[in-house]
Amino acid sequence: MGRIDPLPRESLPQYEEKFEATTEFMGVLPNSLLTMAKKPELYEAFMEWSFVVLRPDEVDGGFKQLIAMLASAAQGCRYCQAHTANHAKVFEVDDAKIEAAYEFETSPLFSEAERSALRVAWHGGMNPNQVSDEDFAEMRRHFSEEQCIEIVAVIAFFGHMNRWNDTMATTLEQAPREYAERHLVEKGGWEIGRHVEAGA
């Protein structure tokens, strides 16, 4: 259960337009944002940052979510694994590919280019960071400098989100929880952990 209660959505009418946009983009309004909104300056800065990092640009939006999912898995954040898997589905990434992300090194569903980025995500999510010169050089073979910057920005962004949600023990919402329970348990060993709803 959450260590700081999120604000009720209806108490924040000034952000309703942003909440609607977030729900359309992610498929759900995260409790993490409703907690962050207790510090309006933080919430507003965060929303600008997240839009720049996560929008489809030089790197596909769905693939950015797989990068985030692997970085979050390496860090151990169950909340962000569930959210990024569910968000990848919103971007129409196939269920089979989301499930296989944990086996990206060997799964035929991933190209060598995708493997190189997911390897950097996996090693970049570890503490201490395990990205090697060889890892980065291999990614540079497949992606432009601008794309590499976008990929690392996603990894770094989720370093923040992993620590926020695990420290806050943010309660996981129903939609990402159900998706994770269906698709991340068998290969990823996913469990809800500290993100369970109070009384559940």
Image (tube, grey):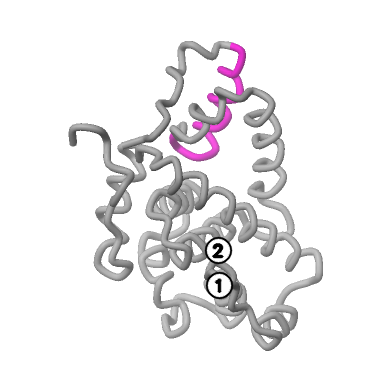
Residue 113, compared with residue 5, is above or below; it is below
Decide: marks 2, 1 in contact (CB < 8 A)?
yes
Seen at 66% across and 37% down, the residue is: 46
Residue 174 position in % (x across, y down): 30, 37
Residue toward you, 113 or 83: 83
Residue 20 location, quadrant: top right
Q: Looking at the picture, which amino acid does disc 2 mark?
A: Ile
* Residue 21 among magenta residues: yes
* Residue 62 among magenta residues: no
Label 2 and label 1: CA atoms lie apart by 6 Å
Residue 45 position in % (x across, y down): 70, 33
Secondary element at image label 2: helix
Seen at 33% across and 44% down, the residue is: 195
Residue 39 position in % (x across, y down): 61, 25
Going from N to C along the chain, the mark reached first, 2 or 1, is 2
Residue 111, compared with residue 37, is above or below; it is below
Q: What label does residue 67 carry, if any?
A: 2
Mark 2, Cα crowd under 10 Å, few <14 / some 14-19 / many 20+, is: many
Chief SS of the magenta region: helix
Seen at 43% across and 70% down, the residue is: 101
Residue 52 position in % (x across, y down): 72, 45
Q: Which residues are magenta?
A: 14-28
Seen at 26% across and 53% down, the residue is: 181
Residue 67, compared with residue 44, is above or below; it is below
- Residue that extends furthest to the bottom in the rendered view of this protein: 134
Residue toward you, 167 or 136: 167
Secondary element at image label 1: helix
